[in-house]
Amino acid sequence: MSQAPPPRDRLLLAGTPNAVRLARLHTTDVLSHWGVHPDSIETIRLLVSELATNAVRHPKEGNQRDPSERAVREPLSVSAVA
C-alpha cells in the first residue's frame, strides 16, 4: 500500500524584518490546522524564527543595496517528521 504524501505548505516572504513575524504566525496557523502538538509547534516556531531572522539579517551577497529591495531568492525549506 502506498501512503498519502505528508502535508505541505509554502509561504513566500520578502526579505524585510516584518517577514520574521509573518513566518512565525504562518507556522503556528498551519501546524495547528494539521493537529501538531503545541509543544512541537513552539519548537518549530523558534526554528523558523531563527532561520527567517538569519535570512533577513544576512542576505546573500549582492542583495544588500536597499533593505526594502532584499528578497530571499532561494527557497528555505523546513521539514518536520513525526
Image: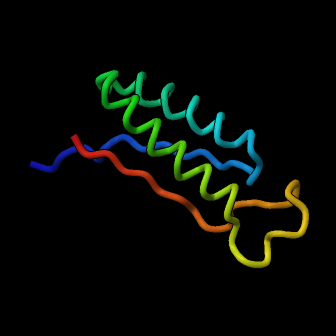
The image position of residue 45, as x and y in percent, is 46, 36
The image position of residue 75, as x and y in percent, is 57, 62
Q: Is residue 61 left or right of residue 31?
A: right
Identified at 77% across, 49% down, the residue is: 16
**Image: 53 above or below 76:** above
- Most foreground residue, 12 or 28: 28
The image position of residue 1, as x and y in percent, is 9, 48
Q: Is residue 8 left or right of residue 64?
A: left
Q: Residue furthest left?
A: 1
- The quarter of the picture where residue 40 lies is top left
**Colouring:** rainbow
- The quarter of the picture where residue 62 lies is bottom right
Q: Is residue 9 left or right of residue 37?
A: right
- Most foreground residue, 73 or 3: 73
- Most foreground residue, 70 or 54: 54
Identified at 70% across, 43% down, the residue is: 19
- The quarter of the picture where residue 61 lies is bottom right
**Image: 43 above or below 77:** above
Identified at 43% across, 52% down, the residue is: 78
Q: Residue furthest bottom?
A: 62
**Image: 57 above or below 44:** below
